[in-house]
Amino acid sequence: MKNMIIKQPKIFLFVLINLLFISGCAIQNDSTTATLYPSSTGEGFTSNPTFTRTPSVIATQTSTPIYTHTPLPTLSSEDAMDFVKEMIKTNGGCEFPCWWGITPGKTSWNETRHFIETFVTSIEERPYRLLTEFLAYYPYPQAIDEQYVTVFYVNPDKIIELIVAPTGRGTIQDVLLQFGPPSEIWIRSTGNISGLAYYQMALLYTEKSIMILFDARRSGLENYREGYIPFCAKDFLDFSISFLWPPDTSLPFTSLVQYIPGKVPIERYGLIIDVSDIDETLFYNLFSTDPEACFETKEEIWPFPPTPISTP
């Protein structure tokens, strides 16, 4: 298929991804789940990927310690808002996959809760397979309903296994310049729906234990080259979701996909090199330097791109 790098006019971007973190969005396929895409597209989670990691990398506990932390003072609404703004800006002085001083594979849920209870408005708990899922809601003025939610997945030893959190404001270009070329890039699209397409891009940094997920909406496809769907930098929101897991741990996209809001099956995603004419290196070179960069895929492959044929 022919690759086209094009320029496009500014379009109005709907703030879709904020909805994920405002209405009990994250990661449960029930009535509280806010999906990324319209229900008419038939999105549903049908596969059952396994959360896999390298056991030898993560220190485990033979018993759950009993913490007797002295409760920290709860911040006022105004102070909590200021605190969250500062943490989103600085990440608490640590680097991903650490989030606000909380490191997956090391920090316990007891320690985490002791810290976040000073500024969150509520915490929900529910089981998730062999893990426990905790949704922590906290104030943020630029979000719908002025709050975000971060999801913590905790193992039976009460250690944080995975964190799913709003990254804050930042474009794809910002992420690429900060973290460098991704190990893998996974994309998907709803296909052309009456001239409209929703699409998604996951930038996977395997060695850094990070995945950054962006969402986009493209209208006016009836005016675009027939038979193709463009993926353009300007279509993506300047807001993303971070997936963070223990350092030096192997966690492939096939396992991470089950934690993406909307519960979309892995079969609807394709590696960028398999569904377009560019690879991760060319994508990085284009999108890290040109805020109007685009690539395109054939419309006919969506919503289910072909499965790559492995060669011996």
Image (cartoon, rainbow, N blue to C red):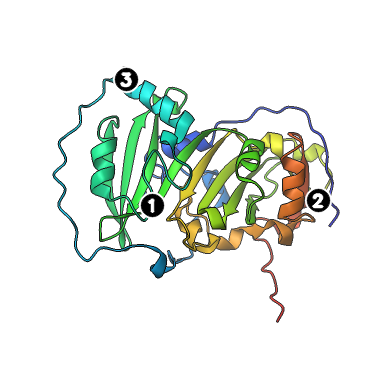
Q: Is residue 5 left or right of residue 14?
A: right
For the residue pair 144 and 154, the one nearer the viewer reads as: 154
Q: Quadrant of residue 246?
A: bottom left
Placement of the C terminus among the 4 image quadrants = bottom right
Closer mark to the observer between disc 2 and disc 3: 3
Q: Is residue 95 left or right of residue 270?
A: left
Label 3 amino acid? Asp
Label 1 amino acid? Pro
Q: Is residue 265 left or right of residue 151?
A: right
Could you tell me if residue 31 is visible in this image?
no
Report the residue marked by disc 3: 79
Count neighbours of disc 1 (C-alpha within 10 A) and say few if under 14, some if 14 to 19, many if 20 or more. Answer: many
Q: Position of residue 245 (x, y in %)?
A: 44, 54
Report the residue marked by disc 2: 227
Report the residue marked by disc 1: 104
> Spatial distance from mark 1 to mark 2, Cα to Cα?
43 Å
> Is there CB contact under 8 Å for labels 2 and 3?
no
Placement of the N terminus among the 4 image quadrants = bottom right
Q: Secondary structure at mark 2?
A: loop
